[in-house]
Amino acid sequence: MQSATSAQEWEWIHQIGGDESTLNEHAAFKAVLDANSAFFHPNLACDVGSVDLVSYVNACVSEHVTRANASSVLQVAVALLGSFMQTGYTGPTLEFELKSYLPDALANQPDALNRQAVQLLRQDGEEAYHLTPSVLHLLFAKLILVDNASSLATRPTAAWWKLRTLFIQQRLLDNPSGTLNDAIAALATDVEAGLEHDEYLKSERNGRIVSELRARFFVEVGLIHHFYGRPAKALVEFKRAQEATQLKYELTGALGKRTKFQTFDVTQLVVIAESRDLSNALASPTTDSSAAKAPEGLALNDDTLLENIEYTDLESKGGKLQVIDQCILLCFCMNVKNANPADGLTSEQMKPFISRVLENPNNWMVHTMGLLLRSRIEAHKGRTAERSVLQLQAIVDQLGVEADATPAERLNHIYSISIPSKWELEAELADRLMSIGVVKSALDIFLRLELWDNVVSCYQMLEKNKQAEDLVRKQLEQDPRSPKLHCLLGDVTQEKKYYYDAWEISEGRYSRAMRSLGAIYFRIGNFAESVKCYGMALAINPLYENSWFVMGCAALRCEDWESAKNAFLQTVLINSDNGEAWTNLASVYVKQDKKRDGWRAIREALRQHHDNSKIWENYLFISLDLKEFSEAIRAMQRVFDIRANPLRAAELAKDPSSLVDLGCLEVLVHAVVHDVEPSEGTQRLSALVPQISRYLEGLCAKMSGSARLYTLCAQFYTACGLYRLALEYLEKTYRVYLNAPGLNEDPALFKSGADAAERLAEAYREFGPMDEAPRLEEDGSGAETVTAVPVCPDWRYQGRMALRTFIGRTKDCYEGMPEHDHLKELLVSFSASA
């Protein structure tokens, strides 16, 4: 086949520059393979039937690059990857089989080839789906684009195709792979650099081609982050894609109705989006030729809900969208789900994005993705659950119908959306059927797909554990070397030996076996062994956030602080929004006497758990230890706000003391009284006095009758020179003891009361004669004069009355005790001074 130009290679990445005939030619993968049939027949020194697939493909590439050129090898790889995507993701069924191009010695053993292909696609102990259709196509594409990448280094788009191939391989695996994650991340950086420096793209005069290429790349990288559970990074890439196409969109509100009998308008969420035409005079914009075609969207047919919201004050939602902009909107929709809790508000926020895309079908596969997302968010509401299941069934059925859309249209944007594979869609349908109680139909689907873990779950739901065990044992008879089946048997029987068998069979590569053992040991309280098992599993595949977290918890339980620290650090590296991991990491740092690190960790935890009063309390303790007084006050205030919430009135009525840790408040007041130096670079306590005062006022309003609290308030206001307030709180302390029900029965209570009475009397003597801060007053002529007023003009009388009342009330029970006699002496001193 003739060597492709750079422009043609970039058109393979996307097809916006071609007309309908070009699209059909690109989709006709058979024509590419026919033209390069010699590629599959290298000159081998040995019998081809005995050669493994890796050596065979390496020989094909090496010889064809020498005999022809790297461009034709790239064409073969792209055709193989595209034909795999057509078979596994978009449909319809291919009209050819790869084995027809292979030497007879290989073509005559298809089952062995498929088994070897599935085995070679494994990574980090994670298995590929064993019934993957046309799996040889993907393996050959991987061996060409990934294993022989150096042979294609001169081709400008080879790295991008390699990126796509690795991500498709990842999507075939049972779980994320750390090795693939690292390789994909590094490759994405290289591809972006290539986009910036490619000579063809620099010279391309059609701005739409360049902008859409960049947008497609950012969308694909964003979807990779979405897959690995990094919503913040995904959002950054989706916004870069939006900037590349200059899409303008806004999530806003408009008046409208959503029910048939609604008589008034209410505000409804709506997405207003407008695409920008980036074409120039040299190249007019193109749209998908089959823009009018769309997969079947089922009607709701509800007796109350309208099919779509009827907006009454909305003139337009922005006109027709470019297909890539529709993909970007769907990406933003998925990011809403990833970055928010699974509740009704999140679903309502997602719906406008989906509705905006479904309003104008431009591409069959993108429209299918929109219908799938709508089906998912409708699954959890009673009025829409039926359509959700039926729509998903319709999507599964339509993927095999060629008349609905050409293979070219279906593949055009396949890498810019997160459409599941055919078998994943069927498994999702089965899960949906299980959720509505149709377990038998779901079981039939899982059996046909040979998803044995799901089959076991169905049997367990039907309370047929014996049947589940028999099924797994039967499969083990057919494939006794399958570590996955041994683990399933362990799941059913709860016997640890089967997990050890799986680990041994896999030669220490099947991480799920050790993860399961780690969970079992954690459950039975053998935390040291749990840490050991999780450590071996995560050494193979470190992308399991939950496994790192449980390992950290197990290490905490057995006081292995270093292992706990490393486990929680790995957890937050995978998911920085895991508040529980940050909290536990802070606890570990405190145990290691690294309080500053613990303080920083708990600050991160509070970003995710802003309403968790227990975490705020822990933050308060560490802040006080580090003399971060401003943060300590903030933490105390936040604990108060959370626990004083009216929704928690019943809890507060049972235990008002939960509003504050008086020990911490005592430390803070002590710091104010003694003017303790704060942490370097923070505010002095004198600057925080108004803030503390407001906090104490609110606290005392909610927590009356606490002598200890009133005493601390008195100490605080004394230190601040607010003597009248100090006297008020000393009086409150005194009255708490004076009116205590057990005053005459509890000597300890009497002694505390006597101490309070003495402090009040001495405070009257000390503060009473003092002048308050001067204040302005008007005399009879209207002139203002500065007047100094004593804190307590009748301080002698007030002191005598307080002492006399307490002495009289406790005379019958405590007369003759040293404390009682001391109060009498104090009373005499007040009378003498009069």
Image: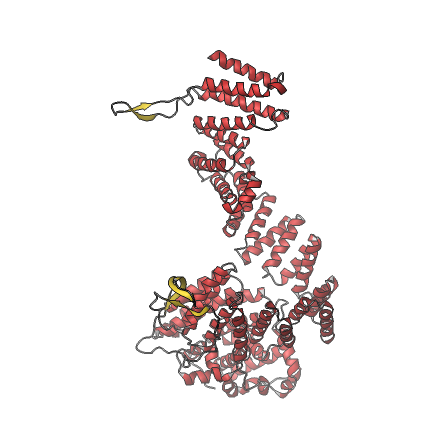
Task: Please name the residue shown 46% across and 29% down the image.
Answer: 717
Is residue 287 left or right of 679 when viewed as pictured? Answer: left
Image coordinates for residue 232, horizontal then vertical, percent: 48, 60
Q: Is residue 769 above or below residue 660?
A: above
Task: Please name the residue shown 56% across and 15% down the image.
Answer: 824
Is residue 57 left or right of 702 when viewed as pictured? Answer: right
Picture quadrant where residue 449 is located: bottom right
Picture quadrant where residue 463 is located: bottom right
Task: Please name the residue shown 48% across and 38% down the image.
Answer: 629
Residue extending farthest to the left is: 781
Is residue 805 left or right of 330 when viewed as pictured? Answer: right
Pick the front one: 592 or 63: 592
Q: Is residue 266 above or below residue 362?
A: above
- Residue 31 seen in the current view: yes
- Residue 185 seen in the current view: no
Q: Is residue 6 above or below residue 242?
A: below
Pick the front one: 207 or 832: 832
Image coordinates for residue 133, horizontal then vertical, percent: 59, 79
Pick the front one: 138 or 393: 393
Name the colour scheme: secondary structure
Image coordinates for residue 113, horizontal then vertical, percent: 64, 80
Q: How many marks?
A: 0
Image coordinates for residue 228, horizontal then vertical, percent: 54, 64
